[in-house]
Image (cartoon, helix red, strand yellow):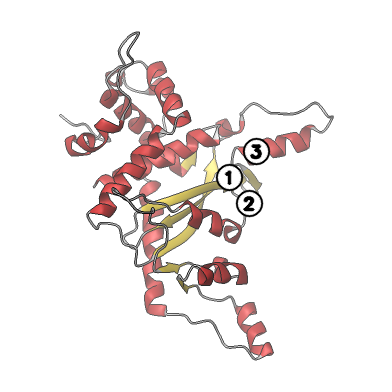
Amino acid sequence: MVRRYELTDDAWARIAPLLPADPERGGRWRDHRQVLNGIVWKIRTGADWRDIPDRYGPWQTIYQRFRRWSADGTFARLLEHIQVHNDAIGQVDWSAICVDSTIVRAHQHAAGARKGGSGTGRPQQSAQSDQGRQALGRSRGGLTTKIHLAADGRGLPLAFVLTGGNVNDCTQFTTVMEAVRVPRPGPGRPRTRPAHVIADKGYSSRTIRTYLRRRKIGATIPERADQLAGRARRGHRRHAFDPIRYKRRNVVERCFNRLKHFKGIATRYDKLATHYRSAVTIACLPLWLR
């Protein structure tokens, strides 16, 4: 019987061949499905590792497996494999990619990563640099993390980037677009370029429009009022904007809503950015496996 928050039989059948095999020497791995279900349960509920139910095995085993697979990129490979499969059967909508970001409040436990100060007598600067490396930013509400995400036309997450919550959206647009990379099952270059990009006013800049024009990608990005006034003063035309196509931008908002059904994503409890990145990757898997 499949319990709540656990992987279905169909979902497990698709990802099981990609998980590491038992080592040639030493003991056997604890059942991968049992452990992975424990990891999903933890991220979905936002509970502490120690509170994982006994039916998933010792919490130490589950945590160590999560750390190991975060470090060696196992979770990222799982997501990439599923994306490749869905793209091969035509279930990835490349007609438009929607880009946006969302801010996540960081729990007080997320601020406890070991500092990397060099002993130069500048503890405040050292703390700020460590927070930056862990994708934590200090804003009016406290420590926050921002998820910059690109979703396809169906609202499925193609790529995401983590930064501190005080980082401007438009500065990460190129990084997010460069992270969109879906390999082909056979020969050929990975798919990286959609037909169109849809984003809100926060991404209206000359740099972004030039980047998209150079890659021959259409852009549906509304201009801010000050930009419109400036172009009018200079006698320039407005950039082309299709309000009907812009209505499709809501798919990225719906994607964020589904990701934040995971309480461990809606609030960040992880101290390390690599662990929180793995948690977001795991939350993306059910969206692709539906």
Q: Can residue 164 be seen in this view?
A: yes
**Residue corresponding to mark 1:** 144
Q: Distance between the residues labelled 1 and 3?
A: 10 Å
Q: In which quarter of the image is residue 48?
A: top left
Quadrant containing the N terminus is top left
Residue at 61% x, 68% y is 207
Please name the amino acid that badge 2 sits on: Asn
Q: Which mark is residue 275?
A: none
Residue matched to label 3: 131
> In the depicted view, which residue is nearer to us: 4 or 125?
125
Foreground residue among 119 and 207: 207
Q: Where is residue 202 in the image (x, y as percent from the top left)?
A: 56, 66
Circle 3: element type:
helix
Badge 3 local density, few (<14 within 10 Å), some, or many (20+)? many
SS under mark 1:
strand
Residue that appears at 42% across and 52% down: 181
Relative horizontal placement of residue 279, taking residue 115 as reference (left or right): left
Residue that protrudes farthest toward the bottom in the picture: 235
Residue sitting at 64 percent across and 88 percent down?
Answer: 232
Residue under pointer 2: 166
